[in-house]
Image (spheres, helix red, strand yellow):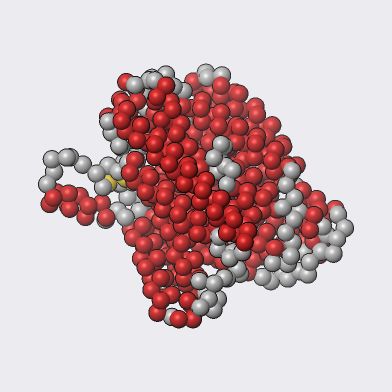
Amino acid sequence: MKIEAGLPEKLEWIQHSLGFFGPELILFAGIVVVLCVGIIIPSLRAGSGSSTPLVIGLIASLFACAVSLAGWNQETEGLHLFGGMIVNDRFSSWLKIICDVAGALTFLLSLKDQRKHVSEYVALVLSVLLGAHMLSMSVGMIMIFLSLEMISITSYVLAGYSFKQEGAEGSLKYFLFGTASAAVMLYGLSLLYGITGSSIISSQEFVEGLLAHQSLLLLVAGLLALAGFLFKMAALPMHLWAPDVYQAAPMPVVALFSVVPKLAGLAVLTRFVLAATAYGQSLIDWKAIVGLIAIVTITAGNVAALRQSNAKRMMAYSSIAQSGFLLIGVAALTEQSIQFMMFYAAVYFVANYLVFGYLQYFESKGVLTIPDFAGTGRTDPVAHGFLLAGLISLTGIPPTAGFTAKLLIFTGLYDAYRITDDSFLLWIFVPGLLNTVIALFYYLRIPYFAFLRDGDGVPAKYLTWTNFLGLVLVLTLLGLFFRPDGLMGWINKITFVL
């Protein structure tokens, strides 16, 4: 946006920008409607367990997803909106589609886990989705901070929505850690603004400012800014909140946290690294820094998961490790590697929701720890068969799409090594493969107890909504293994705009 532009021109630009904000306006309308419904209908305020707000949230998230899909083929690549603070491209659109479907699945899981104040709960989930939409498109520092805080503040409340003491403790830890990380990130962004003279990380002025000030101050500023993005991804060293929050929060909320904030943080981190390495002349190797964070995150997450007995805490450390695999795509930083990262994100989302859906199912039967699963595989083989499919997909074993996703991630990394001849990429490649083997040991602990250990088991019900949803997700994972080219055809249309 030109500084000398008058008020009429600015209003015209804002009006023009709003025309490309269909999905975000739908989510905002959903928030307003569901809150109004909660006010108008007294029984919803009393917490009667009505599913009406959940249905409204489901419709809003699916409608927003449909609008994003409808605009996929429009010529809007690289369209900068609101004075350059927002960029509209297929990279952000793809992540928004995943987040909206994740939101829809969250509402479906919540139908089996209804609590008090349903209207407020739905409004908070939609607010997380709206914040993720904004963060995935943000290239202006102010917009990045506001979007990230929108996700964070609503997430703090959702983390304590179990209305139990452990939920309050988890929410407080999340709030304290999130506040500290936000302050650190804001300080880093302010330093970057002072160094470059631009608040738009996609601008030429920002990129040239980075190249002109290759100093220790720039390294410190960049690392401080990265801290805020890594917090959203639950990647090291900003991961400490995840285990306690995952254990304390309701299962649908945990599933949401494992996908939506993570992908939004991934989007802005990718844009930052792309800007910092735009001309390939930086003395600071940001790709190596991200690669080191990726390997440490994967290793720490996997090693910690091996020691867990609580299923939700194990999945928290699994989510941390999966953040590292997503970061490998950023470390390679080729167009192909980032496209493979987008495929990995989609597969991870499907597998994660499959696992959390069945953890919720077994939690409702009193199965909380991994030893509690003893004997349940023999009494309810269908549920455990679907759960096993999700776990082996997260591991990366055929015939699930998780194998294809990890194969593509490592293929993109190796191809980047061949192009750049950067030996550090091999140092990422080898530990990444070894960690895939380590993950096998804790992912298969639940099937081991379920099928090979004696226990009382749980009564089985085969014709359930959980099994229907599980069947859809399992077929998706199998379909993406045997025919990944269909999804990759869409992802190959993604371009990256600075």
- Would you say 165 lies left or right of 6 here? right
Q: How many marks?
A: 0
Residue ID at (48%, 27%): 287
Residue ID at (57%, 71%): 114
Query: Taking the image as drawn, is residue 90 in sight?
Result: no
- Dividing the picture into quadrants, the one containing residue 425 is top right
For the C terminus, the image quarter is top left
Query: Taking the image as drawn, is residue 290 in sight?
Result: yes
Residue 463 placement (x, y as % from top left) = 69, 71
* Position above or below: 113 against 184: below
For the N terminus, the image quarter is top left
- Dividing the picture into quadrants, the one containing residue 280 is top left
Residue ID at (85%, 60%): 455
**Residue in the foreground of this view, choosing between 351 and 115:** 115
* Position above or below: 37 against 430: below
* Position above or below: 138 against 367: above
- Would you say 173 lies left or right of 453 here? left
Residue 349 placement (x, y as % from top left) = 56, 51
**Residue in the foreground of this view, choosing between 203 and 487:** 203
Residue ID at (86%, 54%): 453
- Would you say 187 lies left or right of 395 here? left
- Dividing the picture into quadrants, the one containing residue 281 is top left
**Residue in the foreground of this view, choosing between 107 and 410:** 107
Residue 369 placement (x, y as % from top left) = 74, 56
Residue 40 placement (x, y as % from top left) = 40, 79
